[in-house]
Image (cartoon, grey):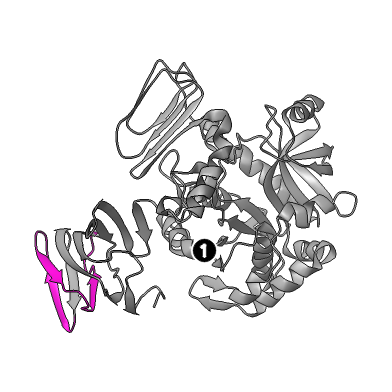
Amino acid sequence: MSSIAVQPVIMAGGSGTRLWPLSRAGFPKQFLVLSGDSSLFQQAAARLQGLGDAHIAVAAPLVVGNEDHRFLVLDQLRELKIEPAAVLLEPVGRNTAPAVTLAALQALAGGADPVLVIAAADQTVTDGAAYTAALRGAIAMAAEGAIAILGVHPDRPETGYGYIRAEGERVAEFVEKPDLATAQRYVAAGSYYWNAGMFVLRASVWMAALERFRPDIAAACRKAWDARSSDAKFVRPGKAEFAAVPSESVDYAVMERCPGQLDIRMQPLAAGWNDLGAWEAVWQVAEKDAAGNASVGDAIVSDSRNTLVHATSRLVSVVGLEDVVVVETPDAVLVASREKSQDVKNIVNQLGREQRGEQALHRKVHRPWGWYDGIDQGPRHQVKRILVKPGASLSLQMHHHRAEHWIVVSGTAEVTIGDKVILLSENQSTYIPLGQTHRLANPGKVPLEIIEVQSGSYLGEDDIVRFEDTYGRT
């Protein structure tokens, strides 16, 4: 018996607004470490790599994500020593149906027709062996030409998920997120399952189904694909062409139309699955004390019940709370009722309307060369901690409105100022005059950390003129 060729596809483009303030537009929830020592994205990648056996040949993963997160994807895969087949970069978000279509077109480009295993990057499971067994069952269905979708038997009347009604292994219908009374009826019926948003099918089967039900999306995606460009592992569909693709989810575009029309089957999944869609879901899967309290970081919880406390940068103490979520980050704190945690997105929307930075970025901002952390700020000054990875460098740049002082805390800095290049070691410093071209690089084999003191009339990140950049940002 020949092996089934499997192409894992990790959908990593979500924004995770309901996990604010930990999740931000520039560092969304799939890249966060919410438990253990790996991010949700890394957990998804590792689980998919474990699908192979004597009958299943698993390829390197395809990742579909946002252009702004491309280096987060590579860095986090590099930590796992996983080399992606390609990273497909959406210039704008167009929901999941176009994202899956990009993956299918990439998978078909080499002339093969592998089984695609489509998994979200922001879910968690507690039983890896059961997850693997369920996906292998779905792969067997897909190898026969079926569309296989994973369904989770509900253990509570959840109103935040869509449901699948199954008749044996056949999918009879998809139903929308219900109200509480309807969800209770679904749980009692026993034939309804949570839609886990994971599905398995051949690349050609997806394209045929999309052509049948939404030929407009298929045609627009092909047009964007034909205009693609490639840069190392990055594949970029045509920007203007992809912006013209209709925005639609996989479920609305294809899956909900399949019952009675195409061979669509359900594979049960009993692996402690959770999509961590809100802080309530994080509390559900967290380890708790005898009173139902869960905590992360430096937290003291007293006389409280069924409460989640997530401390990031300082001690957080709570007394006398019940069914409450408290999330602390260096620049924002959330206090919310657990049952209202889905509504955190309303706060994020308000921050966006007010154009506040807390919606998009943390105080600590990750960049392809490392990160910076804004530790102090005033009307005409700003202080940052900056870490540069070994061998990395910032762009050759200039500022119109600020001068900078750099003090090396650890490592070795190679500093370009105009036509002069100097090396600085621990406790040494230099000054960058306003209007002078300059560059910071780490020529060493250990991380470089510096303190940067900016002073001037304007200190925004957009006061940068880039002349040369390793990361294509000029």
Image quadrant for the C terminus? bottom left
Residue at 84% x, 43% y: name it: 173
Q: Position of residue 12 (x, y in %)?
A: 55, 56
The crowding category of the residue bearing disc 1, from other C-alpha atoms within 10 Å (few below 14, some 14 to 19, many at least 20), is some
The residue that mark 1 highlights is: 84
The stretch of residues the image draws in magenta is 418-447
In the picture shown, does residue 150 fall above or below 67? above
Task: Look at the image and say whether residue 445 sits in the magenta stretch.
Answer: yes
Image quadrant for the N terminus? bottom right
**Could you say which quadrant of the image residue 309 lies in?**
top left
Residue 296 relative to residue 384: left or right = right
Residue 311 relative to residue 60: left or right = left
Report the amino acid beneath label 1. Answer: Pro
In this view of the protein, can residue 47 be seen by the observer? yes
Task: Look at the image and say whether residue 427 sits in the magenta stretch.
Answer: yes
Q: For this rendering, which residue is in front, 196 or 324?
A: 324
User: Total of numbered circles in the picture?
Assistant: 1
**Could you say which quadrant of the image residue 372 lies in?**
bottom left
Q: Secondary structure at mark 1?
A: loop
